[in-house]
């Protein structure tokens, strides 16, 4: 099954995996609506995608998603894909409250809004695709609050899979490290890092299967899944080796 003639709304499309997905779906012949905060980037992307519809919105702004949904007819979409996320690595003690509140608003509350508002726009049998993360599998040092929000999105998708079935086909995407503006913030070597284009192809292939969770690259994600299965006494000892420590003063 391909995506030719399918109508897809990508939220978080201006860069990274979202932009790579938009280009890949356009090559498949899909009709796209593209949303993100950066209207200029969306306009440029829409040109690359054969004149996709541009619908700028900021998930952190109350009412923004509801206003966007009001302009889309019920049952007119084959898929809604939400890749939007913020990332700010660091220690809990060093968190900036305002930046953290915005991160939670986009990553978690924005996902709740997508889950609440977009299903009526999706045709029977269509897909709702939420982006969690391998970072949500277990708490890793330096990953908060991003990891915490992604753990919640993973959980949300699991709940929705049952709640919206069989009318809406809910999928969860859990990428490992993908080379984007967000991961450029990391000050460590990222294992098995892939490009957004490789990630987009993994998503497209996965959406054509029956798999609920799409995780990649598997040489990395299976290792993290195994770590999650270990008893805390062992897994915490292993993750402690990854801890980011403040320098001595």
Image (cartoon, grey):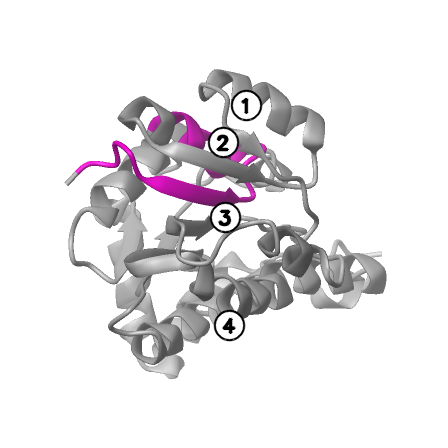
How far apart in space, not on screen, are marks 2 and 1 (Cα)?
7 Å
- Tell me the residue that label 1 is attached to: 45
- Tell me the residue that label 3 is attached to: 83
Element class at badge 3: loop
Residue at x 44% of width, y 35% of height = 32
Query: Which label sits in the foreground, 3 or 4?
Result: 3
Q: Nearer the viewer, residue 16 or 140?
A: 16
- Tell me the residue that label 4 is attached to: 152
How far apart in space, not on screen, are marks 4 and 2 (Cα)?
24 Å
- Span highlighted in magenta in the image: 2-24
How far apart in space, not on screen, are marks 4 and 1 (Cα)?
30 Å
Residue 132 horizontal/vertical position (percent): 45, 59
The numbered mark at residue 19 is 2
Residue 140 horizontal/vertical position (percent): 51, 63
Query: Which label sits in the foreground, 4 or 1?
Result: 1
Element class at badge 2: helix
Position of the N terminus by quadrant: top left
């Amino acid at each position: 099954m391909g995506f030719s003639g399918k109508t897809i709304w990508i939220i978080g499309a201006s860069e990274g995996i979202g932009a790579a997905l938009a280009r890949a779906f356009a090559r498949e012949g899909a009709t796209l609506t593209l949303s993100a905060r950066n209207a200029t980037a969306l306009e440029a992307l829409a040109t690359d995608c054969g004149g996709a519809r541009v619908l700028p919105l900021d998930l952190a702004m109350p009412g923004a998603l509801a206003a966007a949904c009001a302009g889309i007819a019920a049952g007119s979409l084959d898929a809604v894909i939400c890749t939007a996320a913020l990332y700010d690595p660091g220690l809990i003690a060093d968190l900036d409250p305002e930046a953290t509140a915005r991160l939670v608003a986009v990553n978690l509350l924005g996902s709740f809004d997508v889950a609440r508002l977009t299903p009526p726009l999706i045709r029977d049998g269509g897909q709702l695709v939420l982006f969690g993360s391998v970072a949500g599998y277990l708490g890793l040092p330096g990953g908060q609050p991003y990891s915490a929000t992604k753990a919640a999105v993973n959980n949300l998708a699991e709940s929705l899979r049952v709640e919206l079935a069989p009318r809406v086909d809910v999928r969860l995407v859990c990428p490992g490290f993908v080379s984007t503006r967000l991961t450029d913030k990391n000050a460590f070597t990222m294992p098995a890092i892939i490009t957004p284009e490789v990630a987009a192809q993994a998503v497209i292939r996965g959406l054509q299967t029956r798999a609920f969770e799409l995780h990649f690259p598997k040489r990395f994600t299976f290792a993290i899944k195994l770590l999650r299965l270990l008893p805390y006494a062992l897994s915490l000892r292993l993750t402690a080796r990854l801890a980011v420590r403040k320098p001595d003063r």
